[in-house]
Image: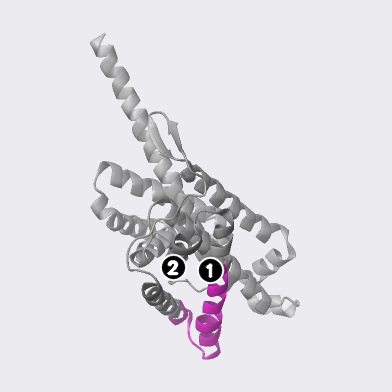
Amino acid sequence: MPARRVVLRCIAEAVTAVTQLMVTTLSNASIYALIAVSLNIVYRSSGVLNFGAGHLAAVAGIFYANEISGSAIGVVVAMAVTAVVSLLAYFVAVQGGARLGVGRVQLSLSLLGVGLVLQFAAGELWAKQAFTARPVIAGTLNVAGTTFATQRVAAVAVAAVFVLAIVLFVERTMVGHAMEATADDRELAELYGVRTGSVAIATWLIAGAALGLAGVLQSSLAAVSTSSALPLVILGIVAAVVGGLGSFSSAVAGAVVTALLQAAFVQYVSPDYSISFVFILLFAVLVLRPAGLFANARTAERV
C-alpha cells in the first residue's frame, strides 16, 4: 500500500505540474501570438519590422490598468486607442521616412524611436511602476489540483478569436485580398488599381489593435510597466521568427513553442535567465532553419 500511494502521489504531482505548465504556456502564448501577428501583418505589407511594438503593447496595458480596466468596453477602447497610435506611428515614422528615401532597417529603428517616446510619455503620465488590471471575469478554476484565474481561460479564448478574425479578414474579404496583393508586389497591385495607401492604413490599424489587446492581456494576467516593453517585443519577435515571418498561423505556432519552452525553463530551471534562454532559442532557429520552423515554401521564399 505505501508503495502504491507513493506512485499515485507521484502521478498526481506530475499531472499537476503538467497542467500548471500548459496553463502558463497557453496564457503567455496568447500575448506573444498577438504581438507576433501584429509584427507579421506589418512585415508582410511593408517589409518593416516594428521594433516599437513592445512599447505600444506596454503603454496600452498601462493605460488600460489605470483608466478603464475591469470591463469589456475598456478592452475595446484600449484596442481602439492603440490602433490610432499605431497609425500615427506609421504616418510619422514609416511614411515620412519613406518619402525621404530611408531604408527598411532605418524605418524599423525609427519605430523603436516612436516607442521610446511613448514610453517616456507613459512614465510622465503614470507612476513608473508595475500595474495590474482588474479582471473582466472574476473567479478561479481548479483543474488537476491546479488553481488558476478564470481570466486566463478568457484571455486565451479572446486572443484565439481575435487572431482567427484577422485570418478570416485577410483571406475572405476584398480588403484582405488587397493586403495580400500589396504584400506580394506593391507596384503590381497599384497597376491593378489597389489603393495601397488605404491598405497601409488598414494594416496599421489592425496591427495596433492586436498590440492593444496584447497589452490588456499582459496587465490582466500578470503586471505591466514601461520596463515590460523590451521583453514583450523580444518575445514577439522570437515567436514570429521561430514560426516563420510572413504567416499568421506560423506566428501562432511559434508563439506556443516559445511560451512552452520559456515556461518549462522557468518552472524547472530558473526564472532569472528566461529571456537569455529565449535568445538561445532564437539563435538556434536562425542557424538551423532561418525561414522558421513552420514556414512553408511560399512564405520562406517571400521572407
Residue 243 appearing in the image = no
State the residue position of label 2. 59
Does 75 appear above or below 101?
above
**What amino acid is labelled 2 in the image?**
Val
Name the residue at 53% across, 68% down.
Answer: 82
Name the residue at 75% across, 76% down.
Answer: 192
Do the CB atoms of the residues marked 1 and 2 lie less than 8 Å apart?
yes
Predominant SS of the magenta segment: helix
Secondary structure type for disc 2:
helix
Residue 272 placement, left or right of 74: left
Residue 62 placement, left or right of 303: left
Does 97 appear above or below 247?
below
Q: How many marks?
A: 2
Residue 94 lies within the magenta run: yes
In the picture as drawn, the residue positioned furthest to the bottom comes out as 100
Does 94 appear above or below 268?
below
Residue 93 screen position, x and y as percent: 50, 82
State the residue position of label 1. 82
**What amino acid is labelled 1 in the image?**
Thr
Mark 1 / mark 2, whichever is N-terminal: 2
Quarter in which the N terminus is drawn: top left
Q: Nearer the viewer, residue 151 or 167?
A: 151
Instruction: Give the class, few, some or many, for how many residues have Cα within 10 Å of label 1's Cα (few <14, many ≥20).
Output: many
Magenta residues span 81-108
Name the residue at 56% across, 82% down.
Answer: 91
Secondary structure type for disc 1:
helix
